[in-house]
Amino acid sequence: MSDPILTIRNATKRYADVRALDDVQLDVEDGEFLTLLGPSGSGKTTLLSAIAGFAPLTEGRINLRGRDISSEPPEHRDFGMVFQGYALFPTMSVRDNIAFPLKVRKRPKSEIATRVAECLALVQMEEFADRMPTQLSGGQQQRIALARALSFEPQVLLLDEPLSALDKKLRADLQWELKSLHDRLGVTFIYVTHDQDEALSMSDRVVILRDGRIQQEGRPENLYNKPRTRFVADFLGKSNFMTLPVKDQNRDAATCTIGTAEFPVALPEAKRPEDTLELALRPERIRLAEPGQEMLAATVRQVSYLGERCQVLVDQETLGTLMVSQPTWKTGVTPRAGLPVSIGWDRDACVVLDPDTRSA
Ligand code: ADP
Ligand code: MG
């Protein structure tokens, strides 16, 4: 792998008694689409601002291609930015907005004209060059903000919830556009969102933050399939959680029991022997079948039809209520409230979680 473009070491940011960032270590690969994901207040904006140079770290350092930029002002870092509330200049036309970063950098007039045209084409807004920002829709304004941030060809683009003010349909369209823009330009994107679907669908890699700390990072499918903590399993998608007695276990597998039923789970590396295991089970991994066909007896409590999927709550004697999600077009049984069913899952469906380590 090539050298990272950014290395963040021991990054801590304190505001009075709040630790907005707490000893963060992160490498950003050149050209990747990296997403910082976490609930409100988890430190996403603080980390992005520290990278941008708006909020200097209390401790730690940030290197850009090996050069320490921790105490450099934002304009020396030269990153493109699309921030929440970092709006277009209202008294400038679209063209002048996009030209602004180039004028500040004293680029020649002819180059500015060419580059503005290129950037308008990039976001498919060629016809809008002479409009004022107030004459654009929210989605169009975000496209221009993006064009402005890219006009001076930054090596890194920082984006803080750029789509959060847009409605769902438009947001989905712009997610595709942003992703394709990233793939065409090869610029490093660092993207902040609290929206898990957005993070999963766009990113090469996702970093999950909580209370200013990195909880877990990895490729979207890895995080989704192998969450290490209950927090990650719960924040990224939906999960059923169960704490079950362990009957026997060896180095990499254990047998869990539910009443008289037994089933095997794979143990993550370095998992200590314990009497019980906390497991996460995705709703879509649970099979629903006629009574007696699968491992456990259960009863349908409630059914919610969502078009492509059907969400079913089932009651199981030992486990309580579980959520099951199945495609509506391919069902083992057609669930309705009160129906006796059976449920089961594959060996790799249950993920063993680490005990939650959040301090009170
Ligand atoms: P996020 O972007 O994930 O919602 P932030 O990075 O904005 O979270 O905030 C992280 C924590 O730092 C929060 O507890 C927030 O209240 C606090 N914080 C952020 N900025 C400031 C500030 N300028 N002064 C004091 N506290 C702040
Ligand atoms: Mg924020």
Image: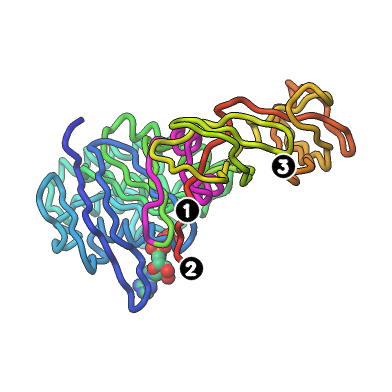
Outermost residue on the bottom side: it is 16
Between 162 and 112, the residue placed more toward the observer is 162
Residue 83 position, x and y percent, is: 37, 56
Whole-number angstrom distance, CA of label 3 to CA of label 1 = 50 Å
**Mark 3, residue position:** 322
Whole-number angstrom distance, CA of label 1 to CA of label 2 = 49 Å
> What kind of element bears circle 1?
helix
Q: Residue at x 30, y 36 (%)?
A: 32
Say whether marks 3 and 2 touch (CB < 8 Å). no
Between 11 and 316, the residue placed more toward the observer is 316
Earlier sequence position, callout 3 versus callout 2: 3
Residue 175, placed above or below residue 163: above
**Mark 2, residue position:** 360
Q: Nearer the viewer, mark 3 or mark 1?
A: 3
Q: Locate residue 21: give its quadrant.
A: bottom left
Q: Which circle marks residue 135 in the picture? A: 1
- Bounds of the magenta span? 212-235
Residue 261 visible in the displayed image = yes
Earlier sequence position, callout 1 versus callout 2: 1
Whole-number angstrom distance, CA of label 3 to CA of label 2 = 28 Å
Q: Which circle marks residue 331 in the picture? A: none
Q: Residue at x 36, y 66 (%)?
A: 20
- Residue type at mark 2: give it: Ala
Residue 259 position, x and y percent, is: 73, 38
> What kind of element bears circle 2?
loop
Residue 271 position, x and y percent, is: 43, 41
Q: Locate residue 300: give its quadrant.
A: top right
Q: Is residue 229 magenta?
A: yes
Q: Is residue 202 magenta?
A: no
Say whether marks 3 and 1 touch (CB < 8 Å). no
Residue 177 position, x and y percent, is: 43, 35
- Residue type at mark 3: give it: Leu
